[in-house]
Image (cartoon, rainbow, N blue to C red):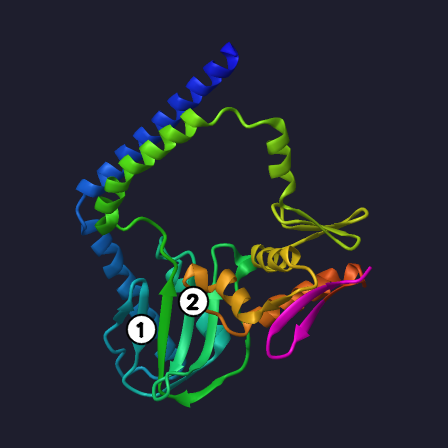
Amino acid sequence: MHLSQNLLSGKHKYLLGVLLLLFVVLLSAAFSTDDNEDFNFAKREVLLRKIGHELLLQSGDSTSRVLPVKKIADHEYQISFENELTFQPDSLVNLTRRVLAKDPLANDYIVNVLNCGSSRVAYGFSISKSKKDDIVACIGRTQPKSCYMINIKFRPTGISITKSGYLLGGLSFLALIGFIFFRSKSVKSPKVMLEDQQTHLFTLGSVQFDAKNRKLIINDTTIELTATESRVLLIFASSPNEIVERSRLQKEIWEDDGVIVGRSLDMFISKLRKKLEIDPNIKIVVIRGKGYRLEISA
C-alpha cells in the first residue's frame, strides 16, 4: 500500500513538472512578437515566386511576368502567370522539391495545377517529410500549353502565436483535469495493460495484422505497410465482411487531416490488394456505387 501511494505521488510530481514546462513554453510564445512568423511567411512567398519564375523558364518564356503570389487560405498559396505556359510534371515535381527544401517549415504539402477558366485540377501531387508517403503520378507526360494556376497547400507545422492566448486559457483546465485523473485513478492493473497491448492486433484469415507496427505477418513472413496503407486496412479490419463506404475512407484517412485527395484512394486499395495476396482467402472487393468490403473466407 505504501509503495502504491509513493508511485501515485511520483505521478503527481511528474504531471506537475510537465504542466509547468508547457506553461513556460506557451508563456514564452504568448509574449513573443509576430516578427519571426511574418518573416517566415515573407520568405515563403519569395520561394513560391521563384518556383513560378523557373517554371516559366522551363517553358521557354523569359519575358512574361509571374503575377503576385496570393494567400488564398491559411497555409495555402496561389501562383499565377501573365501568359499561358506548358510544363512537364516531373520537372515541376523536382523544381518544387528543390526550391521548398529551403523552407524549414515546408515538410508536407500538396500541389495542384488548375486550369484558369474551369479551376479543374490538371495535375497534382503530394510531398511528405516521409518520402515513402509521397504521391506522384503521370510523370513524363507533357501538359498542353494553357493558362494555369498553381495552388500549394502546406500542412500546419506548429502552434500559431495568435492562438497562444487561447492555449494559455486552456492550460488551467488541462491542469485541473490531469490532477483529478491522477487522484482518482490508481495504477493500471496488469490485465488492463495486457488488453491495451492487444487492441492493435487483428487476425485476418491466416494473416495477423499488427496495426501499431504497420505489419502483416503470416508464418515466418513479414510485410511492411506504409502509414496510410495501415490506416486504410485498420478501418477494414475493424469491420470485416461489411461494406465500408468510400466517403468514410476519404474522410477518415485524408479529410480529417485537412487534405482531400481523389484518385489516391484507389491506388492505396490496389497496393493493399497485392500485399494481401499472401492469403487467397482475403480479398478487398469493390461494391459498385457504395465502397469496398474486406472479404475473409473460412
Q: Which amino acid does the dot numbered 1 rest on?
A: Gln
What is the x, y in percent for residue 248? Answer: 53, 66
Asked if the stretch drawn in magenta spans residue 129, the answer is no
Disc 1 crowd, CA 10 A, few/some/many (<14, 14-19, 20+): many
Q: Image check: 219 left or right of 37? A: right
Asked if the stretch drawn in magenta spans residue 285, the answer is yes
For this rendering, which residue is in front, 60 or 86?
86
The residue singled out by tag 1 in the image is 78
User: Measured along the vertical axis of the image, is residue 11 above or below residue 173?
Assistant: above
Q: Image check: 192 left or right of 73? A: right
Instruction: Give the alpha-carbon distance from disc 2 to disc 1, as whole Å.
Output: 12 Å
What is the x, y in percent for residue 137? Answer: 55, 73
Which residue extends farthest front?
A: 184
Q: Which mark is residue 110?
A: 2
For this rendering, which residue is in front, 199 or 257?
199
Q: Image check: 55 left or right of 46? A: right
What is the x, y in percent for residue 34? Answer: 19, 50
Q: Which amino acid does the dot numbered 2 rest on?
A: Ile
